[in-house]
């Protein structure tokens, strides 16, 4: 007896990126037979990211990631997602970009392929490998404030003010703090140079 192929549904998903301002969100249509690994590839393409440090998906109190064998072959339809259900997708296991994905609709489809389409969105995607939400916020702050924010002389002057006013109270290694600030802001400058001006 022939087994009929399972009917395919079109899932409308709304993804909102956590801990980023202004809002970054996307609405996309995907087939429910899409594998989790392919969903990750869709997001990488949508964000225009070449690097792929892996992903994590937490759905129905289960965790799947790009490093576990049990993730292979798992499809969205395996979870029988319903309207308004949410799950967490973490893109990039280094920078930990967290997307909350909500099912806006489940549409039955008969006899036609389901194209993967980004239907609409708002907010520019952060650049790849920029240090996650914290690194991205610092890059935006530096871009808005101008080069004076990371000027070495200004940083040293600020640490000196702290040293003069609170040396005994702070109880921290101020030279180490100064060196850390210099290295941190230098890293931000390098990331901005690689990515070019940020669009928000």
Image (cartoon, rainbow, N blue to C red):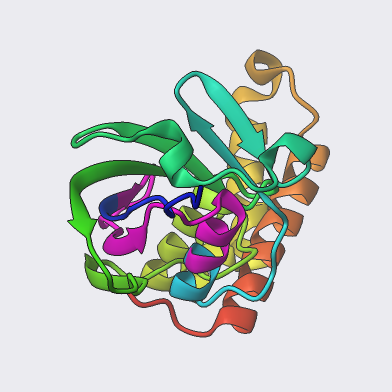
Q: Is residue 30 left or right of residue 172?
A: left
Q: Position of residue 57 (x, y in %)?
A: 54, 38
> In the picture shown, does residue 55 fall above or below 42?
above
Q: Is there any visible trace of residue 72 in the rendered image?
A: yes
Along the viewing direction, whichever of 37 and 24 lies nearer the viewer: 37
Q: Position of residue 142 (x, y in %)?
A: 47, 66
Along the viewing direction, whichever of 148 and 47 lies nearer the viewer: 47
Q: Is there any visible trace of residue 68 in the rendered image?
A: no
Q: Which residues are magenta?
A: 15-42
Task: State which quadrant residue 118 falls in.
Answer: bottom left
Q: Is residue 178 left or right of residue 55?
A: right
> In the picture shown, does residue 80 fall above or below 24?
above
Give the residue drawn at x 57%, y 80%.
195
Along the viewing direction, whichever of 19 and 182 lies nearer the viewer: 19
Task: State which quadrant residue 56 falls in.
Answer: top right
Q: Is residue 70 left or right of residue 46?
A: right
Q: Position of residue 8 (x, y in %)?
A: 34, 56
Q: Is residue 39 left or right of residue 168?
A: left
Is 35 colored magenta in this rendering?
Answer: yes
Total number of numbered labels?
0
Give the residue drawn at x 58%, y 73%.
49
Q: Position of residue 100 (x, y in %)?
A: 36, 41
User: In which quadrant of the rendered image does the C terminus lie?
Assistant: bottom left
Give the residue drawn at x 18%, y 53%.
107
Give the residue drawn at x 29%, y 63%.
28
């Amino acid at each position: 007896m022939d087994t009929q192929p399972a009917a395919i549904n079109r899932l409308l998903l709304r993804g909102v990126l956590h801990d980023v301002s202004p809002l970054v969100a996307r609405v996309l249509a995907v087939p429910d037979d899409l594998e989790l690994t392919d969903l990750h590839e869709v997001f990488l393409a949508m964000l225009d990211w070449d690097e792929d440090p892996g992903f994590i998906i937490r759905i129905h109190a289960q965790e799947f990631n790009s490093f576990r064998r049990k993730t292979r072959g798992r499809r969205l339809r395996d979870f029988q997602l319903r309207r308004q259900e949410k799950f967490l997708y973490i893109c990039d296991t280094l920078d930990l970009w967290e997307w909350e994905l909500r099912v806006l609709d489940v549409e039955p489809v008969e006899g036609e392929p389901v194209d993967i389409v980004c239907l609409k969105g708002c907010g520019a995607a952060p650049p790849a490998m920029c240090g996650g939400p914290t690194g991205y916020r610092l890059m935006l702050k530096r871009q808005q404030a101008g080069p004076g924010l990371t000027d070495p002389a200004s940083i040293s002057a600020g640490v000196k003010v702290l040293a003069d006013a609170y040396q005994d109270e702070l109880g921290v290694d101020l030279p180490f703090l100064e060196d850390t600030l210099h290295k941190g802001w230098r890293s931000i400058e390098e990331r901005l140079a690689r990515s070019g001006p940020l669009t928000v």
